[in-house]
């Protein structure tokens, strides 16, 4: 009986440790990965962002000003929710969209040169937000 109780205790501790590691996680932000959007035949700049365990790939996208953008977003498979937010009304770039396993498309036209951050603001209870764990990037609008 004592052995069984000991095994349950050890199993419980290991399970709680694993859950805490998944929930709290270390900062897994990747080095900067840039992507230069290219204007396609349909006159749209196209790019794709994948979100995962506290990262975006790419986490820096270079866009040209005054050319419409078609941004595909999706997340890696998993149960952790993610979103992507940009709030730059002065540049015509404002969205707050959930990231799903299937790609969705966000369309906008950047109207001002500059660097505009994007990030995930999801958070569980009292743990750090996904942004605080490194899930952020930048849209760089150039001439």
Image: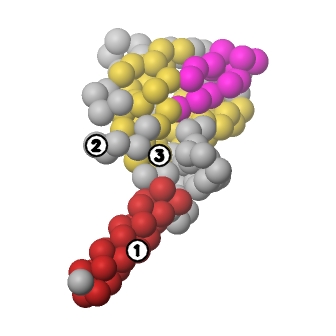
Q: Farthest residue toward the front?
A: 1
Could you tell me if residue 52 is visible in this image?
yes
Q: Which mark is residue 77?
A: 2
Q: Residue 13 carries which label?
A: 1
**Distance between the alpha carbons at the discs numbered 3 and 2:** 14 Å
Circle 1: element type:
helix
Labels 1 and 3 touching (C-beta < 8 A): no
Question: Which residue occupies 51% across, 46% down?
Answer: 59
Q: Nearer the viewer, mark 1 or mark 3?
A: 1
What is the magenta range? 84-96
Label located before the other in sequence (1 or 3): 1
Closer to the camera, 9 or 142? 9
Label located before the other in sequence (2 or 1): 1
Tell me where residue 27 sits by quadrant: bottom right
Q: Name the residue under label 3.
A: 56
Question: Which residue occupies 70% across, 23% down?
Answer: 88
Residue 134 x/y as whole percent: 58, 54
Question: Which residue occupies 46% across, 27% down?
Answer: 98
Asked if the magenta segment contains residue 118, the reply would be no
Q: Main secondary structure of the magenta part?
A: strand
């Amino acid at each position: 009986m004592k052995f069984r109780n000991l095994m349950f205790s050890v199993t419980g501790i290991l399970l709680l440790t694993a859950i805490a590691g998944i929930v709290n996680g270390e900062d897994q932000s990747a080095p900067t990965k840039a992507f230069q959007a290219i204007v396609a035949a349909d006159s749209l700049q196209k790019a794709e962002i994948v979100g995962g365990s506290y990262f975006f790939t790419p986490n820096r996208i270079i866009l040209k000003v005054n050319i419409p953008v078609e941004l595909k977003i999706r997340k890696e498979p998993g149960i952790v929710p993610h979103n992507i937010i940009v709030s730059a009304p002065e540049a015509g770039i404002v969205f707050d969209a959930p990231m799903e396993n299937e790609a969705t498309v966000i369309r906008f036209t950047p109207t001002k040169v500059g660097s505009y951050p994007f990030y995930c603001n999801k958070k569980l209870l009292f743990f750090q937000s996904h942004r605080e764990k490194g899930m952020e990037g930048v849209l760089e609008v150039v001439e």
